[in-house]
Amino acid sequence: MPDGFDDDWSATVCAALDSLFLGASAGFSRSSPGQPRDGVVSDMLWEADPLRFAERYPDSGVVESYGAGWPPPCIDYWVYVDVPTRLAMLSTEGWTGDHRPVELSGRGAVDARRLAAALGEILSVPAED
């Protein structure tokens, strides 16, 4: 286990973000990791149904960003985790894309709130306390 990270970090963060993405009502489902697991994972991916995403977020510009390639198989929302720097990078689609850093504490509950707040701001979904 990386120094200072909770044993259940990934499972705690995934559970909180699963709830947030469900609240987005855009057909999001978690693709990676497929099953909750102990420790820290290097990346997490939620994929939205492109048609539901475009309907829910018509001002996102996601349809225009794909042009003739619309609709894509899915709309990706990644969380990349860099354990040594204690930093997560959000990579999102829509609204010209967003690559937003989020500082990590190593505590699953704290980091889940931080990540949910950042993603909730992007998707206009209030994060749960």
Image (cartoon, rainbow, N blue to C red):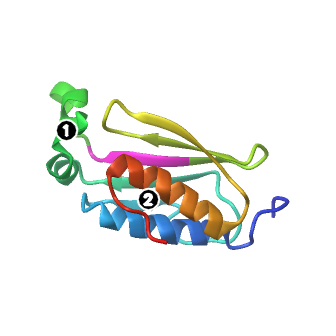
Decide which of tag 2 and tag 1 comes sooner along the chain.
Answer: 2
| Most common secondary structure along the magenta stretch | strand
Q: Residue 91: x percent and y percent?
A: 47, 40
Which SS class for mark 1? helix
The residue that disc 1 covers is 59
Query: What whole-number distance in Å separates the C-alpha atoms at marks 2 and 1?
Result: 25 Å
Residue range highlighted in magenta? 73-79
Quarter of the rendering occupied by the N terminus: bottom right
Q: Is 68 inside the magenta-drawn segment?
A: no
Q: What residue type is labelled 2?
A: Ser
Question: Left of 110 or right of it: where is 99?
Answer: left
Q: Where is residue 18 in the image (x, y as percent from the top left)?
A: 43, 67
Q: What label sits on residue 17 in the rendered view?
A: none
User: What amino acid is at disc 1?
Assistant: Asp
Above or below — where is 81 with respect to 110? above
**In the displayed structure, does residue 79 sit left or right of residue 82?**
left
What numbered label is drawn on residue 31? 2
How packed mark 2 is, by other alpha carbons closer than 10 Å (few <14, some 14-19, many 20 or more), is: few
Residue 6 shown left or right of residue 118 in the figure: right
Kindly identify the residue that appears in the image at 53 percent across and 55 percent down: 115
* Nearest to the observer: residue 30 or residue 110: 110
- The crowd level at tag 1 (other Cα within 10 Å; few <14, some 14-19, many 20+) is few
Quarter of the figure with residue 2: bottom right
For numbered disc 2, what is the local secondary structure? strand
Q: Are marks 2 and 1 in contact (CB under 8 Å)?
A: no
Name the one closer to the observer, 25 or 36. 25
Q: Is residue 7 left or right of residue 20?
A: right
Dividing the picture into quadrants, the one containing residue 89 is top right
